[in-house]
Amino acid sequence: MLTSELIEDAKAIIGDMADLAQTWTAVGGTPSFQVIIGQPLITQDLEAGGFMDRVAHEVRVVAATGSWTTAYGTACAAAISAGAPVASLAIGKTLVASEQGNRQYRIVGSAYKPGTAWVVLQVRAQDER
């Protein structure tokens, strides 16, 4: 099936990018995901007194339906359960980036289309306004 091949390719991409992939966990330490972070996105929100620039990042998580291990030995949790992203990847949840000094990111947007290899999240650092 094409979907399983896409997911295996996504796992291989993460496995080949050990120096770029990062370990992010839900608050509390589990579950743990290997993610690829995109370039910063600048958005504007209308606040009292004018527009406020906000910095967000696109984060990609392999849309695996079961736990798996990277080629370099890092355990990863399933990102999909019952055809949808797991609860720890829902909008409003917080993920912790261990390679960034445990910086916390709040999920502000999410995209997943069944049959694709990635869950795409838009996150914003908790320590930024």
Image (cartoon, rainbow, N blue to C red):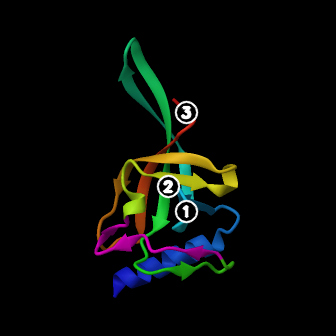
Marks 2 and 1 close (CB-CB < 8 Å): yes
In this rendered view, identify the residue nearer to me: 119 or 76. 76
Image quadrant containing the N terminus:
bottom left
Q: Residue furthest top?
A: 49
* Residue at disc 2, secondary structure: strand
Q: Is residue 76 magenta?
A: yes
Which span is picked out in magenta?
74-86
Residue 74 percent coordinates (x, y): 64, 75
Q: Which residue is mark 1?
A: 35
Q: Which mark is residue 59?
A: 2
Residue kind at label 3, given as amino acid type: Glu
Instruction: Label 1, secondary structure: give it.
Output: strand
Q: CA distance from mark 3 to mark 1?
A: 21 Å
Residue 13 percent location from the top left of the image: 57, 72
Q: Amino acid at mark 1?
A: Val
Of the image marks 3 and 2, the number of the one nearer the N terminus: 2
In the image, is residue 121 part of the stretch drawn in magenta? no
Q: Residue at x 45, y 74 (%)?
A: 78
Q: From the top left corner, tell me how far across and down residue 26 is, in percent.
A: 51, 59
Q: Residues within 10 Å of mark 3 (few under 14, many from 20)?
A: few
The amino acid type, in three-letter code, at marker 2 is: Val
Q: Residue at x 61, y 63 (%)?
A: 23
Q: Position of residue 33 (x, y in %)?
A: 54, 67
Check the image and report above or below for 47 versus 98: above
The residue beneath circle 3 is 128
Q: Earlier in the sequence, mark 2 or mark 1?
A: 1
The residue located at (48%, 81%) in the rendering is: 8
Q: Nearer the viewer, mark 3 or mark 2?
A: 3
Where 87 falls versus 63 (above or below)? above
Q: Of the two numbered discs 3 and 1 on the same chain, state the one appearing first in sequence.
A: 1
Instruction: Compute the Cα span from label 3 to label 2.
Output: 17 Å
